[in-house]
Image (cartoon, helix red, strand yellow):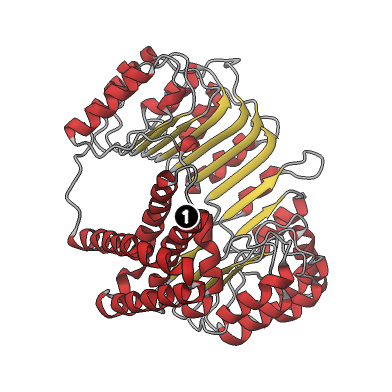
Amino acid sequence: MPRLNQPKSLEQNSIRALVHFLCDLGEKMMPIIISLSKSEVHRSSQTLEHRIRFVQKYFEYNVPCFLYDPLCDEICIEIPKMIDRIKKRLRPGSPMTEFLSQINVAVSLTEVILSPSLRKLDCDSLPKMIRHLFYSKLSSLSGLEYLNLGSLSGGWKTCDMEPTVLNGIVTMKNLQYFCLNYDCTNNILLALLENCPRLTTLDITSSKSINNDSVNILHRFKNLRRVQLYRTSISIEGYVKLLLSLPFLEDVGRYDEIGRCLEYIVDNYPEKQKFALKKFTSRFVTTRFLQILAENCPEIYYISLFHNVLLCDLLMLVGVNKLSDLRLLSCDFFADQVRNVLAVKGCNLTHLHLEHVDEIDMNALMYISQFCPDLKALTFYNCEMIPSTSVFIKKPTIPPFMNMERLTLIAQCDARHLEFLLCSCFKIKFIKIGTMVPTDDALFQKILSLNPMIHLEELSISCSAGLSIATVYKIVECCPSLSILNELEGWDLIDEMELEAFRLFIETNNFDLNIASKRFQAE
């Protein structure tokens, strides 16, 4: 049976009570602000601002600095719920000014966490209704170490948003991670250079204002380790300059011409023969590029490539000594010698991602299981999984996938493939199964009898025509670590009454099990 819901820690209870206190305070302020807004609009704004400032100071004096991040998370969950309650109270004929005043009070409550004590801000995870408040108050967050502004205006209002970002950056002396997609400019880079000496990671994907002139700024970030420049206007020349001037650069993100850059440097700069790169992601790869990775990038451990049989010999991957994370796109398991690569390098691999890889049968799965004994994460995405053309006679020397912790299977396959993958993975923690995988009660009954999956924490089966509510109860009975069981709404044999009874079963037994569907969760 799954774990029981445990009492929350004192810290968690204190944070939750504090947020409820804040929401109650907001409810009490609403009638006052509504009354003032009818006669003195300017005074209502001043009154709201004054009271929010008082509460903000109250929080700063009483909340420990290390609890501001979890407090921010809790507030960003409760404020949208509060706004939903306000919307439900709205009746036909109600004055719109009253409704807008209530919404204004609810949104303004989030200002209490705008403090130098906040260390992390991820705008992508914030509700859209309160993002603008954080954008306009960035200067208050001088203690940030992690700042993700997301797509901001999506590139439509870059010039208008630039002053807002600049006003915030100049105060962030401790910033280590900065992400701004679409709207980054050279002025923002200069501000980061002058005010954020500890910056190590920069993500400015899809920012069209970033070009080769920007490289003259980027190469001055001597502590930069990771930079994402995908879909910017930087050319091969700019990437070459970055690789030459940043000796500690570990990751440049996806760039399809990165192999050409490395080749040019190796051929024309004999003094620069070693790179600190640890990740390589490209859709244009030749045999020479892989050879350069093996010889000139000794720290490379992650390779993601699109295979072209006319340009690339995958056997060159054998020379990459520290390769542990391999992602292959568009190749044949046997014809393109993926099997031979795994035979040599499989003992080092912990993560294997195969996308649009054909010729995967039971033999291929057996080879993967035997060649990669330490594999922890395995993904098949839109692969061609076919019945075996011959029988694998040799008995496996080790149980297949005995160390695997994560399995993602989004491909059309046979029930035997799924059974083989799951029967021996005794350490499995995460399973995601797509819509094209045949599943039924008998199959899972057999799998669970061989492998009860005592470490399984999350199971997601997007769609099934053969799984019933009996399998759900069986999974709950066998998997004591299970905490997330998703997408039960997509199982054809489960009706709404059975699902509601299962929810009641979880609640009655106080199980710590989340069965909410991710597809229908609102922001």
Quick check: 191 above or below 399?
below
Percent position of residue 61, x then y: 27, 80
Residue 132 as seen in the image, left or right of residue 514: right
Q: Which residue is at the front of the view, 346 or 383?
A: 383
Amino acid type for the residue under numbered disc 1: Phe
The quarter holding residue 425 reads: top left
Quick check: 168 above or below 325?
below
- Residue at 52 percent of width and 57 percent of height: 129
Residue reaching furthest to the front: 39
Answer few, some or many: residues within 10 Å of disc 1's Cα (few below 14, many 20 plus, some between 14 and 19).
some
- Residue at 80 percent of width and 73 percent of height: 212
Label 1 SS:
helix
- Residue at 36 percent of width and 75 percent of height: 51
Residue 117 appears in the rendering? no
Residue 134 as seen in the image, left or right of residue 500: right
Percent position of residue 184, x then y: 69, 70
The quarter holding residue 65 reads: bottom left
Percent position of residue 282, x then y: 71, 52
The quarter holding residue 152 reads: bottom right
Q: Which residue is mark 1?
A: 99
Quick check: 479 above or below 512?
above
Percent position of residue 354, x then y: 60, 37
Quick check: 337 above or below 146?
above
In the rendered image, the quadrant that contains the N terminus is top left
Residue 384 appears in the rendering? yes
